[in-house]
Amino acid sequence: MKRLIIVAFLAMVFFGLTGCATSSAYLRDRKNDAQDVVTASCAKGAGFRVRVGPVHVGAIDEQDSFGLRGGTVGQAANNCMESELLVLPQRIEEHRFFSLELYKPITNNRGKDFGAVSKLPFITTGLQGERSFPFYYLTQIEIEFGIGYTVRLGGNIGELLDFMLGWFWIDIFKDDVGNAESTAY
């Protein structure tokens, strides 16, 4: 326990001396990167699915999720629907979450929204006309299960790396709002 307190104190001193502690945009980006690491949401539906990157196995049908997903806590837009049946593999995802505080899309600013459809059994591909999957989608690991309501739990190894490197101003996924505000999309 003493070791944890010492490490936390030294980290605060380090970040205070580097100026990181005084930058609200910097801390907001670190918070967003930390939220990107974990997925925890619930939805109406039933089924079971395990996903590692674009490879998924299971049968699930769900709609309208709420929770922490795509780095944002909130409710998905009404058009958020996922359907993946073993007989007819098809899946459509719209990761467009709204902030609980401002009720405006914030995932778009961070490049966290995308569409997906599965034409091949258990392999997800990008929607036609959409940009290809961002790298962070390929490093996501999730499990979903439930009857009536489903629970989705997951983690993202790539986002964990982005979070850790972000403390040293390295943004491998280019999802920091500070970067988005300073560069034109």
Image (cartoon, rainbow, N blue to C red):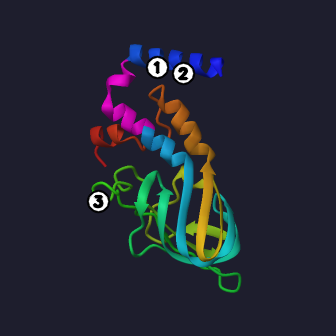
Q: Quadrant of the N terminus?
A: top right
Q: Which residue is mark 3?
A: 104
Q: Position of residue 142 (x, y in %)?
A: 64, 59
> Considering only order in the chain, which callout, 2 or 3, is on the residue closer to the N terminus?
2
Q: Nearer the viewer, residue 140 or 122?
A: 140
Q: Nearer the viewer, mark 3 or mark 1?
A: 1
Asked which secondary structure carries label 1, the reply is helix
Asked which secondary structure carries label 3, the reply is loop
Specify the amino acid type for callout 1: Met
Label 3–label 2 contact, CB within 8 A: no
Image point (55%, 77%), residue name: 62
The tag on residue 12 is 1
The tag on residue 8 is 2
Specify the amino acid type for callout 2: Ala
> Considering only order in the chain, which callout, 1 or 3, is on the residue closer to the N terminus?
1
Side of 95 relative to 61 (left or right): left
Image point (65%, 18%), residue name: 3
Side of 169 relative to 57 (left or right): left
**Residues under labels 3 and 2: Cα distance?**
34 Å
10 Å crowding of disc 3: few (<14), some (14-19), many (20+): few
Main SS, magenta residues: helix
The quadrant holding residue 73 is bottom left
Asked which secondary structure carries label 2, the reply is helix
Say above or below: 99 vs 21.
Answer: below
Image point (42%, 44%), residue name: 175
